[in-house]
């Protein structure tokens, strides 16, 4: 297999996802038995020794359709002391007017208006600077927090002095289309499992930008969120961990979100995620030459291998296409894009095993709904592997050619075909 370029491409294309799948499975199962299975039910959070005040920061950019629901659910959270700081980042719709109306009805809501679109990172920074509290919980303008989410997030800061951030468990609200159904399984079987495994192995690639709690003093040490990075959540995760802070994953902190349900919206979202990963790959490679930063080496290697795999898959596909019309040397001939015989069976079995295990782990959060989406996950490799390959290949040159220091502003994302979708 390894005596030719085509053999190397085939070997890496097959063994990389296989190895990573079992790495995630092992870490996720260990996480479950080490911590998760001993947890009380989601709606019965543990009693905390202390309940420090919390600031809930909601950056908003053209969120008029979702904002009333988000603020209403936030105001009804079960926690002794918290305030809501909504930051209107130069919205061009009625977001500002809605926030002003809501402020008159919710005593614990404060509203900040930015005249122009400054980007999500700047909106978060303004909210953090306006907050008098040490613990900041940041959610998106379309997100709906579970009633007990603050308890689950805050307990890590109360018991862990080195904890800088705690990322929650996003759950998909809009599930009416094929893409929506697949993403329900993806957030359980891929994203949730990876975060569990990374928590066990010591470092998390990124917090979830849609729901994360931060320690304000830790953010101050690293200069808050970077305004020139396309994904501020990935960047701040790396800077906090390079500064030797701890980041944790809390699956009990549920947050219901809207996701793209069109191919165009999904492409734009995943391209932004891929570019954000490529940007930290470029930005922090010198920092990782230090022995003191060695705990981030595995995360860096995993990211580098993931991007390399996307390019290997692309090169293999190009060689196969060229071979259909032109004769190639024997060492460059790719006979088929499908894995050969037992390799394809093993990879398919591993993929289904990963889905079964991860959906079983996530079953305690959606007992009646999660398992029904297992059928739709057979489409995941076809839709999302191809999408991830394409976005990774496009994102790397975009990150390399990006002008350093340019402000990263945001545009209104695709929030699904049914934007008023409710929690299941």
Image (cartoon, grey):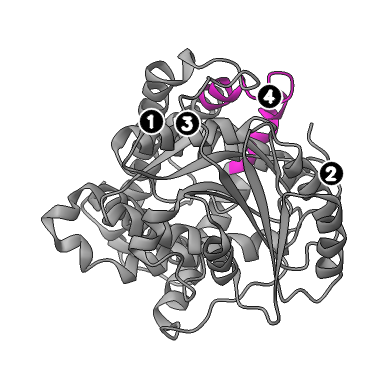
Q: In front: 327, or 180?
A: 180
Badge 2 is on which residue? 421
Badge 4 is on which residue? 366
Q: Please indicate, yes or no, whether residue 334 appears anywhere in the rendered image.
A: no
Q: Secondary structure at mark 4?
A: loop
| Residue at the image position 78 percent from the left and 62 percent from the top | 63
Q: Main secondary structure of the magenta part?
A: helix
Q: CA distance from mark 4 to mark 1?
A: 27 Å
Badge 3 is on which residue? 155
- Contact check, label 3 and label 4, Cβ < 8 Å: no
Badge 1 is on which residue? 159
Q: Position of residue 202 (x, y in %)?
A: 29, 39
Question: What crowding class fits label 4: few (fewer than 14 Cα within 10 Å), some (14-19), or many (20 or more)?
Answer: few
Q: Nearer the viewer, mark 3 or mark 4?
A: 3
Q: Does residue 296 sit above or below 42 in this rendering?
A: below
Q: In front: 215, or 398?
A: 215
Q: In front: 398, or 68?
A: 68
Q: Position of residue 183 (x, y in %)?
A: 66, 43
Q: Position of residue 178 (x, y in %)?
A: 76, 43
């Amino acid at each position: 297999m390894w005596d030719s370029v085509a053999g190397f491409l085939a070997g890496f294309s097959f063994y990389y996802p296989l190895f990573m799948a079992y790495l995630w499975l092992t870490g996720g199962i260990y996480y479950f038995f080490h911590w998760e299975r001993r947890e009380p039910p989601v709606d019965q959070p543990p009693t905390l020794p202390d309940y420090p005040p919390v600031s809930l920061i909601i950056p908003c950019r053209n969120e008029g359709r979702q904002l009333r629901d988000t603020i209403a659910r936030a105001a009804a959270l079960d926690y002794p002391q918290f305030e809501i700081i909504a930051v209107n980042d130069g919205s061009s719709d009625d977001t500002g007017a809605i926030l002003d109306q809501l402020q008159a009805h919710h005593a614990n809501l404060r509203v900040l208006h930015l005249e122009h679109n400054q980007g999500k990172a700047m909106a978060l920074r303004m909210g953090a600077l306006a907050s008098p509290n040490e613990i900041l919980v940041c959610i998106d303008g379309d997100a709906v927090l579970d009633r007990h989410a603050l308890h689950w997030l805050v307990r890590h800061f109360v018991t862990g002095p080195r904890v800088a951030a705690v990322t929650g468990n996003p759950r998909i609200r809009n599930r009416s289309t094929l893409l929506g159904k697949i993403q329900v399984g993806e957030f359980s079987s891929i994203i949730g499992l990876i975060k569990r495994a990374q928590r066990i192995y010591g470092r998390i690639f990124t917090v979830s930008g849609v729901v994360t709690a931060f320690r304000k003093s830790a953010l101050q040490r690293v200069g808050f969120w970077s305004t020139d990075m396309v994904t501020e959540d990935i960047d701040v995760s790396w800077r906090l961990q390079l500064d030797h802070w701890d980041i944790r994953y809390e699956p009990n902190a549920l947050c219901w979100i809207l996701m793209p349900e069109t191919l165009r919206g999904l492409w734009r979202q995943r391209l932004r995620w891929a570019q954000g990963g490529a940007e930290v790959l470029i930005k922090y490679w010198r920092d990782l030459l230090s022995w003191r930063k060695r705990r981030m080496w595995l995360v860096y290697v995993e990211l580098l291998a993931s991007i390399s795999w996307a390019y290997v898959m692309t090169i293999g596909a190009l060689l196969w296409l060229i071979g259909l019309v032109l004769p190639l040397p024997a060492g460059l001939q790719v006979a088929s894009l499908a894995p050969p015989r037992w390799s394809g069976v093993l990879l398919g079995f591993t993929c289904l095993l990963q889905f079964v295990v991860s959906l079983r782990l996530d079953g305690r959060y959606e007992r009646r709904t999660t398992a029904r989406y297992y059928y739709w996950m057979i489409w995941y490799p076809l839709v999302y592997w191809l999408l991830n390959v394409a976005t990774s290949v496009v994102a790397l040159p975009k990150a390399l050619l990006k002008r350093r220091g340019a402000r990263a502003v945001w545009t209104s994302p695709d929030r699904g075909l049914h934007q008023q979708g409710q929690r299941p």
